[in-house]
Amino acid sequence: MTTFTFTPIAFVRTPYADTAQVPKGCGAQHEAEGVIEVERALEAGLGDIEGFSHLFVIWVFDRSPGVELFGIAPTDDRPHGVFATRSPKRPNPIGLTVVELLGREGCRLRVRGVDMLDGTPVLDLKPYLSSVDPQKLRRGWLAEAEARRRG
Amino acid sequence: MTTFTFTPIAFVRTPYADTAQVPKGCGAQHEAEGVIEVERALEAGLGDIEGFSHLFVIWVFDRSPGVELFGIAPTDDRPHGVFATRSPKRPNPIGLTVVELLGREGCRLRVRGVDMLDGTPVLDLKPYLSSVDPQKLRRGWLAEAEARRRG
């Protein structure tokens, strides 16, 4: 079977030593600041990144507790397919977070909006270039779960 | 050195046999339709995904031509760091695309907005839940390059 192997380009410093500390569920705010420490050998790859206000961070749930294809998310009391959630229990334990770039000092990127554990390995960084129009966005079970909670 | 190995959860059918066919550069529109064919063993993971209008697709540039930390993007005639671009020549050749979900038949997801080659391996699918406010978004060198072109 085809497989792909990746080496971290960076590690993230965050305030979270334990998943219980990470805000989850409806209305969770991710305002925590952190530092993405990029490998020195890759510093040239950061050229001009400071012009972007937001970045995609693609990272690894390196302490993830296995796979659950259909399970309960913290935002709801009903089960959903894992690809319809942000659960860490994914076939490939890859995380995706949008962060705000606050500043750069050499290989260190100061960011806001981290929701991963301290020491999390990062596979890639990309500029956030455009947004889906909120009027065109449907959020399926999550919108329904939020409505039930408000109800 | 720590490494992480992943197995594709899906492959994408797209109209593009060659990278020259993929629209690139300023104002490129990604309206092409494609099909994400998810592995049968993972079908339970797709439960409730049809409620979401847009998905993140995390995939592999499996035919990528090596790494270039600082290079010229098709959108500009000046070089930029690879982490400030969507170049395929990344240390970890991972792609990220937002697609619109048009429909699902079992393990097949019909989507709009593909920009990867036909047969591209997919590592993960996630629901697109919210957008960065366009008023808060800065797009660095890309905005500058677009402004220069408009001249």
Image (cartoon, coloured by chain):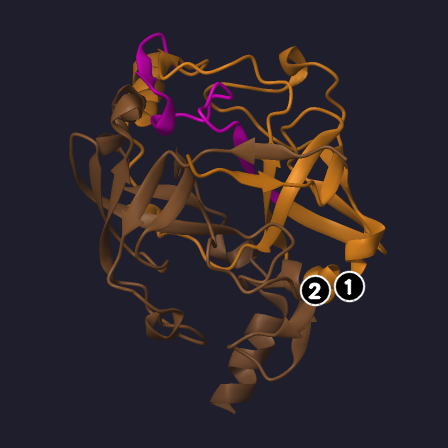
Chain colours: A orange, B brown
Q: Separation of disc 1 and disc 2 at Cα?
A: 6 Å
The amino acid on which the numbered mark 1 sits, given as a three-letter code, is Ala
Quick check: do tags 1 and 2 share a chain?
no
Q: Residue at x 22, y 40 (%)?
A: B109
In the image, residue A32 sits, relative to residue A4, either above or below, namely above
Disc 1 + disc 2, Cβ < 8 Å? yes
Residue B57 marker: none
Name the residue nearer the viewer: B37 or A133.
B37
Identify the subunit bearing mark 1.
A
The answer to whether residue B12 shows anywhere in this view is yes
Name the residue nearer the viewer: A20 or B81.
B81
Identify the subunit bearing mark 2.
B
Instruction: Please state the extent of the stretch shown in magenta in the rendering.
Output: A76-99
Q: Position of residue A81 (x, y in %)?
A: 32, 21
Q: Residue at x 64, y 15 (%)?
A: A19
Residue under pointer 1: A44
In the image, residue B86 sits, relative to residue A100, either above or below, namely below
Residue under pointer 2: B69
Q: Quadrant of the N terminus of chain B?
A: top right
Q: Position of residue B5 (x, y in %)?
A: 56, 33
Q: Quadrant of residue B53?
A: top left
The amino acid on which the numbered mark 2 sits, given as a three-letter code, is Leu
Q: Residue at x 32, y 17 (%)?
A: A80
What kind of element bears circle 2?
loop
Farthest bottom residue? Answer: B151
